Image: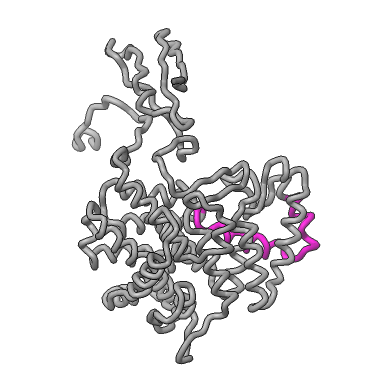
Amino acid sequence: MVTESLTVRDNRTGVEYDIPITDGTIRAADLGKIKAADPANNEEGPGLAVYDPGFVNTASCRSSVTYIDGDKGILEYRGYPIEQLAENSNFLEVSYLLVHGALPTKEEYDAWVHEITYHTFVHENIKEFMQGFRYDAHPMGMLMASVGAMSTFYPDAANISDPDNRRLQIIRLIAKMPTLGAWAFRHAQGKPYVYPDNDLSYTGNFLSMLFKMSESKYAPDERIEKALDTLFILHADHEQNASANAVRSVGSTQVDPYSSVAAGVGALFGPLHGGANEAVLRMLRRIGKVENIPAFIEGVKAGNERLMGFGHRVYKNYDPRAKLIKQQAYNVFEVTGTNPLLDIAQELEKIALEDEYFVKRKLYPNVDFYSGLIYEALEFPPEMFTVLFAIGRTPGWLSQWLELVQDKEQKIARPKQIYTGERGLNFVPRDVRWA
């Protein structure tokens, strides 16, 4: 049997090391075996470590949740192409797939939908907690705080070693996130909170809690419902991104899932992660009209403008989610009317995909390029965009968390550092220093 390995020669000592290669990776601990004498004390020094800011080439876990091939533009949940799931499935079925690792039978699906539907209500004290925020509180701050607060309402969630208990908390979180998100939206508008309607679908109920006014029964438009459900699917997971890493890092302390997911919400709050679609809208508005696009493109090439919604740290091809969102944008505009920014977006995309400058740099539209247009058409303020992202991402976060707590190789997250400060200083008392 041929064993793949990497032979490393330490030029400090002349010693060679054979390091096993598994799944295209080497273990950092194997590099730690490479040591040289420490000239300061004539003893063996510390082993080699890897310096990798942002974990751009470091695998922190083994995972079977999501597969991405950025060069080929492939995204799969549990082996299923995102295109097939977006076209043929719905968000709750995809959530089941992510959490359980397989598609449900009819009986399993019906039970799953029933359980989530009847856990959409939250404790009245959580409602009072949310009402305590200022009128201008950011919805993501409200969501992050209320998700964390739920750990105090379900103290049994701390028992993460019990599979049945874990499943219950997962159902609660997926079910209650739309309620919390919708209430944060209503809070900012000074409108009364709307309770869940269990006669509606998961996404239809969310739309009801967002937009219901004086009507006795809210009936969402099927095209809007489908578009939002598709967006939830496309956002459901994306491998080891910043928020998934936050969920796993906090979860590695064996804390309850509410605290871990609250950490994920906090990471998503950052503009480099969850706020890119808002930046796309600002860019399109600044361009103003189609005739201004050539000048804008030249500004990008000169370094005076930034092309938002293009390029991705993972994808070096067309983001498969962008194509799916683009089609849903057309469906939404059939209901809401065309957004004039769509014409600018389409022409900008056309030019960028043909221009050698952008093609050479593999700058293709990503998931954020069209999603903001849909959210704006639905009359969401920009600060709500990331809340919608968080609702869709919740089953992915929970799948990552569940995988973490069952992985015997995982340890509490504790990265190394390279210390660059002073050493061996002598403390001088205040009366001497200040004399």
Most common SS among magenta residues: helix
Q: Quadrant of the C terminus?
A: top left
Taking the spot 35% from the left edge, 14% from the top edge, the residue there is: 36
Left or right of 29 in this view: 190? right
Q: Which residues are magenta?
A: 272-299
Q: Is residue 278 magenta?
A: yes
- Which color scheme does this rendered protein use? one colour
Quadrant of image for the N terminus: top left
Does 362 appear in magenta? no
Residue 375, percent across and down? 57, 69
Q: Taking the image as drawn, is residue 133 in sight?
A: no
Q: Would you identify the image quadrant in which residue 425 lies?
A: top left
Give how far across and how far down residue 71 sits, in percent.
62, 41
Name the residue nearer the viewer: 305 or 16. Answer: 16
Give the quarter of the image for residue 393: bottom left
- In the picture, measured across the screen, residue 306 lies left or right of residue 203, that is right
What residue is shown at x 77% (from left), y 43% (from top)?
356
Find residue 214 and report its horizontal and vertical position in percent: 47, 91
